[in-house]
Image (cartoon, rainbow, N blue to C red):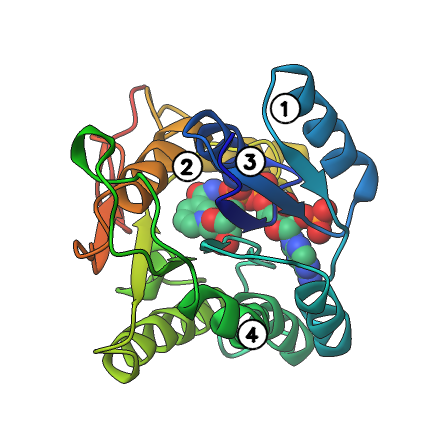
C-alpha cells in the first residue's frame, strides 16, 4: 500500500468526511482531523475496516501551537485539504456580533493559514509517486486544497462575516499560488455553492433545525458532500503539473448565491 498521505481538516462531518472516504479509496493514507475525536475515531475505524489506512488526530485549527505539534508528528504530507470552516448567523452588517465575525475569520482564514504554514515544508518535499496516467511515475510535489465557497466570490444580504472570511480564504489561496510558482506545490481552490450537509446550516443557525431546513426548502437536488468530495478527489488526482486553480461547483438549481430555483 502507498504511504502517500492526505491530511483532511474538518473530517468529522459533511464534506471533510466524504473527502476522506474518497481519498482513502484513491489510495491515500488519510489523516483525519477535527475537534470531535469520537467522530474522527469512528471514521478512521470504518476506513481501516474497509482495508484503507487512516489515522485520527484531534485538532483545533485555530490553535497555532496545537497545529505546529500536529505537523511535527507527521512523517509525510502529500496533500492538505483545508476544509474545516463554517458560518455563524445571517445577521446584517449593521447589527452582527463582532465575536461571530472573529470566530469565522479564525477558522476559515487563520485555520487555513496555520495548517498550510505548518505543513508546507513537508508538502514541498512530497516525493514522486505512481500517480500519473497509467500509473506512470510523476514528478512528485505537494497539493494544497482550500475549500472556500461561492461566498468567496460574491456576496449576499446576511452573508456579512462569512462572505468576508471566505473572501479571505480565496485571497490566501490565490496569493500562495503566486508565491509558490516554481516550487513543486499546487494550490487548488474548490468553491461550492449550496451543499446539503447535516451540520453546516445547523451550525449557522445555532442548532435551530427549522431555520436550517429552510435553507434547502424546495430545492430538488442541492449538492451533496459526496459531490464536492468528488471534485476535490478529481483535482487532487490530476498529474502534478496540472493545477486546477479554481473550481466552482453549484447545484443546477442554483445560478448564483441569490438565484435559487425552489419547487413549490
Ligand atoms: P460541516 O459543519 O459538516 O463541517 C465543518 C467541519 O469543520 C466539521 O468537521 C468541524 O468539526 C470542522 N471544524 C469547525 N471548526 C473547527 C476548528 N476550529 N478546528 C478544527 N475543525 C473545525 O460543514 P460542511 O461539510 O458543509 O462544510 C465544510 C466546508 O465547506 C466549510 O469550510 C464550509 O464553509 C464549506 N462550504 C460549505 C457549503 C455548504 O453549503 N455546506 C458551501 C460552500 C462551502 P468539529 O466540530 O468536530 O471540529
Pointer 1: what residue?
A: 47
Image coords of residue 236 (percent x, y)? 32, 45
**Mark 2 and mark 3: span between their CA atoms?**
9 Å
**Mark-to-mark CA distance, 4 and 1:** 32 Å
Question: Which of the 4 image quadrants contains residue 151?
Answer: bottom left
Residue drawn at the location 41% of the way across and 69% of the way down: 124
Name the secondary structure under disc 1: helix
> Which of disc 1 and disc 2 is earlier in sequence?
1
Q: What element carries label 2?
A: loop
Question: Residues at badges 4 and 1 in contact (C-beta under 8 Å)?
Answer: no
Q: Is residue 39 left or right of residue 33?
A: right
Residue ID for mark 3: 14
Residue under circle 2? 195
* Distance from the alpha carbon under mark 4 to that under mark 2: 21 Å
In depth, the one of 193 and 72 nearer the eye is 72
Give the x, y percent position of residue 80: 48, 56
SS under mark 4: helix
Q: Of callouts 4 and 1, which one flags the residue occurring earlier in the amino acid sequence?
A: 1
Q: Is mark 3 within 8 Å of ligand 1?
A: yes
Q: Is tag 4's residue or tag 3's residue first in the polypeptide sequence?
A: 3
Residue positioned most to the right: 38
Could you tell me if the residues under marks 2 and 3 are in contact, i.e. CB atoms within 8 Å? yes
| Residue that mark 4 sits on | 105
Front position in the image: 256 or 235 = 235
* Residue at the (37%, 23%) spot, across then down: 218
Crowding around mark 3 (Cα neighbors within 10 Å: few <14, some 14 to 19, many 20+) is many
Q: Which residue lies furthest to the bottom in this view?
A: 179
Tag in front: 4 or 3: 3
35 or 70, which is in the foreground?
70
Secondary structure state at the residue bearing disc 3: helix
Amino acid at each position: 500500500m502507498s504511504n502517500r498521505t492526505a491530511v483532511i481538516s474538518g473530517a468529522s462531518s459533511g464534506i471533510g468526511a466524504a473527502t476522506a472516504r474518497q481519498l482513502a479509496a484513491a489510495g491515500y493514507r488519510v489523516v483525519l482531523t477535527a475537534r470531535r475525536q469520537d467522530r474522527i475515531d469512528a471514521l478512521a475505524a470504518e476506513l481501516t475496516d474497509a482495508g484503507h489506512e487512516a489515522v485520527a488526530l484531534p485538532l483545533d485549527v485555530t490553535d497555532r501551537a496545537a497545529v505546529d505539534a500536529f505537523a511535527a508528528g507527521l512523517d509525510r504530507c502529500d496533500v492538505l485539504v483545508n476544509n474545516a470552516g463554517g458560518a455563524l448567523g445571517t445577521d446584517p452588517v449593521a447589527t452582527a456580533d463582532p465575536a461571530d465575525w472573529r470566530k469565522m475569520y479564525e477558522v476559515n482564514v487563520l485555520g487555513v493559514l496555520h495548517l498550510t504554514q505548518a505543513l508546507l515544508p513537508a508538502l514541498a518535499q512530497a516525493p514522486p509517486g505512481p500517480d500519473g496516467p497509467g500509473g506512470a511515475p510523476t514528478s512528485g510535489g505537494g497539493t494544497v486544497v482550500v475549500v472556500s465557497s461561492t461566498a468567496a466570490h460574491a456576496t449576499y444580504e446576511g452573508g456579512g462575516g462569512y462572505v468576508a472570511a471566505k473572501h479571505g480564504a480565496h485571497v490566501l489561496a490565490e496569493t500562495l499560488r503566486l508565491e509558490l510558482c516554481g516550487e513543486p506545490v499546487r494550490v487548488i481552490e474548490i468553491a461550492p455553492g449550496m451543499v446539503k450537509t447535516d451540520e453546516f446550516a445547523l451550525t449557522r443557525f445555532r442548532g435551530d433545525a427549522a431555520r436550517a431546513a429552510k435553507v434547502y426548502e424546495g430545492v430538488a437536488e442541492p449538492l451533496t458532500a459526496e459531490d464536492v468530495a468528488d471534485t476535490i478527489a478529481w483535482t487532487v488526482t490530476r498529474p502534478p503539473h496540472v493545477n486546477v486553480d479554481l473550481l466552482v461547483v453549484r447545484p443546477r438549481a442554483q445560478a448564483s448565491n441569490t438565484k435559487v430555483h425552489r419547487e413549490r
